[in-house]
Amino acid sequence: MVDRRIRQELASTKKEKPAPDQLQFGKEFTDHMFIMDYTPNEGWHDARIVPYQNISIDPSAMVFHYGQSVFEGLKAYLSPEGEAQLFRPDINLKRINNSNERMCIPKIDEEFALDAMKELVALEKDWIPEAEGTSLYIRPFIISTEPFLGVAPSHNYKFIVILSPVGAYYKEGINPVKIAVENKYVRAVTGGTGEAKTGGNYASSLKAQEEANKNGYAQVLWLDGVEKEYIEEVGSMNVFFKINGEIVTPELNGSILEGVTRSTAIRLLEHWNYPVSERRVSMQEVYQAHQDGQLEEAFGTGTAAVVSPIGQLSWGDQHMVINEGQTGEVAKALYDNVTGIQYGTVEDPFGWITKVNETSVVEQ
Amino acid sequence: MVDRRIRQELASTKKEKPAPDQLQFGKEFTDHMFIMDYTPNEGWHDARIVPYQNISIDPSAMVFHYGQSVFEGLKAYLSPEGEAQLFRPDINLKRINNSNERMCIPKIDEEFALDAMKELVALEKDWIPEAEGTSLYIRPFIISTEPFLGVAPSHNYKFIVILSPVGAYYKEGINPVKIAVENKYVRAVTGGTGEAKTGGNYASSLKAQEEANKNGYAQVLWLDGVEKEYIEEVGSMNVFFKINGEIVTPELNGSILEGVTRSTAIRLLEHWNYPVSERRVSMQEVYQAHQDGQLEEAFGTGTAAVVSPIGQLSWGDQHMVINEGQTGEVAKALYDNVTGIQYGTVEDPFGWITKVNETSVVEQ
Ligand SMILES: Cc1ncc(COP(=O)(O)O)c(C=O)c1O
Ligand SMILES: Cc1ncc(COP(=O)(O)O)c(C=O)c1O
C-alpha cells in the first residue's frame, strides 16, 4: 500500500520571479520542489514538498559514477481562465516507468506521482508565466544515491520534481532550422538505451551537437547505429517528413524515444484524415524524394518547441532546402492545434488536458 | 599556468578502519578526499584535500539529468618495504582526458592530477590494507555541476578523488567464472561512447548483467552493436583468448575501453615471446576453435581482478567448457607477474611503478 501523504515544508522567503521578457529555459527554479526516497525495505517513501534547495549526497553515490538515472519533461500551461493545466502527464509517467524498467530502477506509482506533480504545480501556480507561449517546465527525475562503487543497480534512489518558468520557444514566429545528418556519431542502437529517457543518451549526444553548432547547424539528424542509413530522431526531438502527401515518421524500434508530441501529432493527423505511416525511413528515400520534388515538409516534434520545421537538411555535400526554407502547412497546423489544446484555446476532443486542482493543496 | 598548490583541511576525527577480514569493494571510504572545481574563467582551480564529506549540489545540476561525467579506477599497493605505490597511473590520467574529449569535458592537467592523487594517498597511507591481495582503490571522477536543464556541455565541473580500502579479489585462489554471450543488449557501438569511461556505458549494462546473474552467470560477454558477431569485452573487463597457441584480443575499434591491464598483458606477453594479436574476433571463430579443441584459454583483464579466467562460455544453447573449467597457464602467469609488479615482489622492467613519496605531503 502506498502512503499517499505528502508532507509540506514551505519556504520562509520567496524568490523574485524573473521578468516576463527575461525568461530562459531551465535556468531559474521555483520556491519548492518535491522529493521522495527509495529504500528496499520501505519502497518509495517520505514524499515531501520542501523549499528548493541543494541536495547533499555522498561523492560515491552511484549516479555520479554509473549514470543510473532517468528523467521526464513536461509543462504546465495557463488557460485563458487562469487555470493551470498539464498536457498528457500520464504518458510522461508511463514513460518514466518504461525508462525505469530498462535502467533497473524501481517503478513509481504513476497516479501518486501525478498527484504530487499537481500539488507542487498548484503550490507554485504564481510561477506560471502569463505571456503567450510561456509555461512552467516540469522536470521529474530519479537518481541512484547508494554510496557504493560496485557496478550493480543501486539500492537507494531519490525521485525529485523541480519546476522552471520558461519563455516562448518562438519569440518571432516559427523559425525553420538547418539540420546536419550525423554520419560519425551515434546516439543509440538496437539493444541499447535509446528508448529510455536516461542521462547517458544525452551525454553521448553532446559532441555531435557541438560539432554541428560549430558548422552552423542547429541540431543533428541521427541515423540508426547499425546501418547508418535509417532516420531515427532530430536533436532531442522525433522527426516527421511529408513525402508526396504522405506523412511518415520512423517507427518505434527500441532506439527511438517515444515522444508525447510524436504520439499527439500522429493522433491529430489521423483525426484530420492525413495518411500517416510509422515505418523505417532511409536517408536515401528522403534524398530521392527531395530530388523528385516530393519532399514537401520535414519537422521535429518535442515538448520544448512542439514543432520545429527543418528548413535545410544537409547530408554530406547535399544541402536540401525544404519547402523553400518556410514552415509547411502540416507543421503549422500541428503547432497551432497542439499549443491551442495545451493553452486551452482550442477544444480538447481527446481528453488530453489535466487541470491542476488548486484545492488539492494541503497546508502543513 | 596551473596553480599547483593544494590546500589541506584535515579531518578532526578519524574513522575506524575496517577489520582486515571485513574488507569489501567500494563501500567504505577514507578520511579525506581531493576536490577541484572548474569554471570557464578560472579553469580548474581551488585544488584541496578536505575531510571525506557529502557534496552539496543543485538538483538541476547537469550530471543528474544528462549524465555528463567520466571516471577512472586504479589502486595503491603496499610493497614489502611498506611503501605505497601506484601502477601506471599516467595511463589512467591519459584515459580520463580521452574520456573528457569525447564527453565535452575540459581536460585536466595530468601531471598535477597525479601529484594530487599521490598527495592524497600519502596522507591516507594508513588506510592501505596489508594483507595479500588487498589494496586501496582510487576513484578519480568528474561531474558536471552547472544548474541548467539545457542539453549542452556544462560550464562547471568538479574533479574529485575518493579512496576505498578493498579486500583481495580472490580469497581462495583464482576462480574461473561462467559467462553468457549477450545476444539482446548492447553496451556500446561504433560512433557511441564505448571507448570513454563514462557513466552511461555502465548504466546501460545493468539490465544485461542482472539477467545474466539470474541465469547463474557471473558476467556477460558483449558483442559489437552493429553485427552482433564480433567480441568486444566481458563485463567491465577486456577479454583475451588463447586459440591454438596464439593469444588474441579484440582490437581497439572505438567501442571498446582501452584497459590498462589489457595493455599491460599485451606488453608482458610480447616480452615473453607469445604470439599476440589484436584483431577482430568473432563468436563464430571462438566457437569453432572450441569445437576443434583449439580454444585453450579465455580470460578477462581489469584493475579489479587483474585476470578473471572464463571457465564456461555459453552462447545460446552452446555451453563451452574451457580448459576443463580451470585457470590456464597464460592467465596464471599474467596474474602472478602483474600482481607481483604491483606489489613490488617481482621486478618492474618497464617502469610501471610510481612510488608515492610520503614527504610530498604539505601540512596546512
Ligand atoms: C531523445 C528525445 N527524443 C524525442 C523527444 C520528444 O519527446 P516529447 O515529445 O515527449 O517531448 C525528446 C524530448 O523529450 C527527447 O529527449
Ligand atoms: C568497460 C571496461 N572495460 C575494461 C576495463 C578494464 O580496464 P582496466 O584494465 O584499465 O581496469 C574496465 C575497467 O576499468 C571497464 O570498465
Image (cartoon, coloured by chain):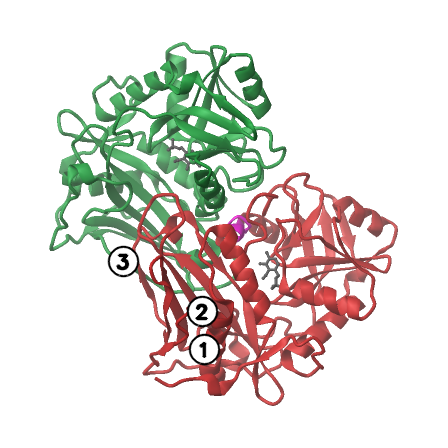
Chain colours: A red, B green
Question: In which quarter of the view is residue B114 placed?
Answer: top left
Furthest toward the front, the residue is A1
As shown in the figure, which amino acid type bears the numbered disc 2?
Val
The amino acid type found where label 1 is placed reads Leu
* Image x and y of residue B266, in percent: 41, 20
**Residue B174 % position (x, y):** 31, 24
Q: Is residue B169 above or below residue A9?
A: above
For this orientation, the residue located farthest to the bottom is A81
Residue position for label 1: A120
Q: Regarding mark 2 in the picture, which secondary structure is present there?
A: strand
- Is residue A201 found inside the magenta-colored segment of the image? yes
Magenta stretch, residue numbers: A200-206
Question: Circle 1 sits in a helix, a strand or a loop, which is it?
Answer: helix
Circle 3 sits in a helix, a strand or a loop, which is it? loop
* Residues tagged by mark 3 and mark 1 found on one chain of the structure: no
Residue at the image point whose x is 50% and y is 61% from the top: A71
Chain of the residue that carries numbered disc 3 in the rendered image: B
Q: Are marks 2 and 1 in contact (CB under 8 Å)?
A: yes
Q: Which residue is mark 2?
A: A161
